[in-house]
Image (cartoon, rainbow, N blue to C red):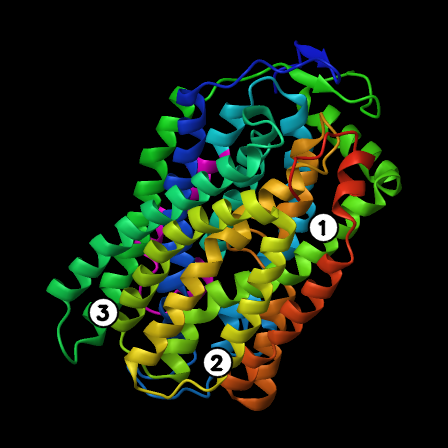
């Protein structure tokens, strides 16, 4: 790893960002959202669950499967493999992402760190072309690499935000990035919908599996291709040295480990930032679980066709584009904190409604998807910008490393709870309604955060409206 050769004191003003640079930052949302939308939200859950069921001895296209598989000698229900896999990937991210963030804070070549993780994740996604038959372990391993790389790259990407926008503009900049991400992810999903519609054959379950696999591969290609634009338009900036940051001794990797250790020791100095992070990890775990398991719920419990799921996710994507911008505008009037609280009330209603959805009826599922789309983008974009206000300068990467443990398609306790409830009750409906806990608890935790005091305590200037 290259040594850190440039640093600026924490009180030095960073060079102003340009429109071209901000557009480059937006484009990484456009690039990586294909993975979250096409892979995690739509195709991977049903695809990998079917592959796992084949490994458990169930026939392709069977309505129900009570078979079990034994990865690493541990017997589990085939339907629980994917939720457990998500939880494992996030458990690994707990250890990886903060280290990635610490390295990002110490290197003056941050955008190339972004490139390394983005291209690694894209490659693992493309290699799903070889997940055929009953190769569920290969699919699980590739997903772990892709999802961890996805989270690591997004940590680096998020750490650019405080350098690109002042406190009063961050809600707007973050919302634009998130909105463009939903637009890009929705566009690729639309292309996949056209392919599935034109090429699928009634009663040919193998063709459906093949189309799902190549749709997953297309997301890896999209991710890699559009990551080139941020690399061309973003610019590396000097390292900002925080007073708590250990002095440079070696390369960015070893210094990153040392900086992470110092940050963990000094976490108690920013208790309000940690309290916000706790609230975010709780409610966003619920959001990400809904996103990740929605297609599995629609397929296995509601018995909906793949085309219905894709159309619903398209509705979510394109409404989320407008919803992110609209909630960003609302945040300019009433503040990001109040807007996120309002979105959590709406999320609770969505989960309760999901429990009562009738099986084999596409329209109610699509209407619920429209409601999700309206609140989805704004709740995530505004949480990202609000957290950026509470981070000590020079430690953006590290703190976003902790933040990313439950962001952009990753969650831990939600899928674990869902998987356990399904294994105990064999009911996806009971599993989905258990997620209300995350939104209710997250709401009251966030309500208790003194946001303005948290921003001042981190050494930052609060925006005009909170």
Of the residues under marks 2 and 3, which one precedes in the sequence?
Answer: 3
Magenta stretch: helix, strand or loop mostly: helix
Give the residue number, with chain letter if any, for mark 2. Answer: 353
Up/down of 39 relative to 307, above or below:
above
Q: Tell me which residue sits at (42%, 22%) in the image.
A: 19
Q: Secondary structure at mark 3?
A: helix
Q: Are marks 1 and 2 in contact (CB under 8 Å)?
A: no
- In the rendered image, residue 212, in percent from the top left (x then y), is placed at 28, 62
Residues rendered magenta in the picture: 117-138
**Residue 225 figure quarter:** top left
User: Can see residue 466?
Assistant: yes
Toward the viewer: 269 or 196?
A: 269
Instruction: Between residue 111 and residue 391, name the one nearer to us.
Output: 391
Badge 3 is on which residue? 208
Query: Which residue is located at x 70 percent, y 18 percent?
Result: 240
The disc, 1 or 2, on the residue closer to the chain's N-terminal end is 1
Question: Relative to residue 76, is residue 457 drawn left or right?
Answer: right
Q: Which tag is nearer the camera, tag 1 or tag 2?
A: 2
């Amino acid at each position: 790893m290259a040594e850190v050769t440039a640093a600026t004191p924490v009180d030095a003003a960073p060079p102003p960002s340009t429109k071209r640079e901000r557009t480059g930052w937006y484009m990484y949302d456009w690039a990586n959202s294909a993975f979250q939308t096409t892979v995690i939200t739509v195709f991977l859950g049903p695809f990998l669950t079917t592959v796992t069921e084949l490994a458990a001895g169930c026939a392709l296209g069977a309505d129900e499967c009570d078979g079990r598989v034994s990865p690493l000698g541990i017997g589990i229900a085939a339907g629980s493999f994917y939720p457990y896999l998500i939880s494992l990937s996030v458990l690994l991210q707990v250890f990886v992402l903060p280290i990635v963030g610490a390295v990002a804070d110490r290197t003056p070549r941050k955008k190339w760190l972004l490139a390394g993780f983005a291209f690694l994740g894209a490659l693992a996604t493309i290699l799903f072309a070889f997940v055929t038959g009953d190769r569920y372990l290969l699919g699980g391993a590739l997903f772990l690499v892709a999802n961890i790389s996805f989270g690591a790259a997004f940590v680096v990407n998020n750490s650019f935000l405080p350098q690109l926008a002042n406190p009063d503009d961050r809600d707007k900049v973050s919302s634009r990035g998130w909105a463009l991400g939903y637009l890009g992810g929705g566009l690729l999903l639309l292309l996949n919908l056209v392919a599935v519609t034109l090429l699928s054959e009634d009663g040919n379950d193998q063709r459906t599996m093949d189309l799902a696999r190549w749709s997953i591969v297309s997301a890896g290609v999209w991710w890699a291709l559009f990551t080139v634009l941020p690399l061309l338009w973003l610019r590396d900036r000097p390292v900002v040295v925080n007073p708590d940051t250990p002095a440079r001794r070696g390369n960015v990797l070893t210094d990153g480990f040392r900086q992470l250790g110092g940050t963990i020791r000094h976490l108690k100095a920013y208790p309000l930032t940690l309290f916000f992070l706790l609230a975010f990890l709780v409610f966003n775990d619920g959001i990400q679980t809904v996103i990740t398991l929605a297609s599995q719920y629609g397929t296995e419990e509601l018995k909906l066709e793949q085309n219905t799921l894709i159309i619903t996710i398209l509705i979510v994507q394109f409404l989320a584009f407008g919803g992110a911008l609209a909630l960003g505008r609302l945040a300019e009037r009433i503040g990001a904190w109040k807007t996120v609280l309002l979105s959590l009330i709406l999320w609770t209603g969505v989960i309760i409604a999901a429990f009562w959805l009738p099986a084999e009826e596409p329209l109610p599922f699509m209407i619920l998807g429209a409601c999700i789309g309206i609140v989805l983008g704004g709740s995530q974009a505004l949480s990202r910008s609000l957290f950026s206000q509470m981070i000590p300068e020079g430690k953006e990467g590290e703190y976003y490393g902790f933040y990313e443990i439950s962001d952009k398609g990753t969650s831990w306790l939600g899928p674990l709870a869902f998987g356990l409830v399904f294994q105990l009750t064999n009911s996806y409906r009971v599993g989905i309604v258990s997620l209300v806990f995350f939104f209710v608890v997250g709401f009251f935790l966030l309500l208790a955060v003194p946001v303005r005091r948290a921003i001042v305590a981190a050494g930052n200037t609060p925006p005009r409206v909170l």
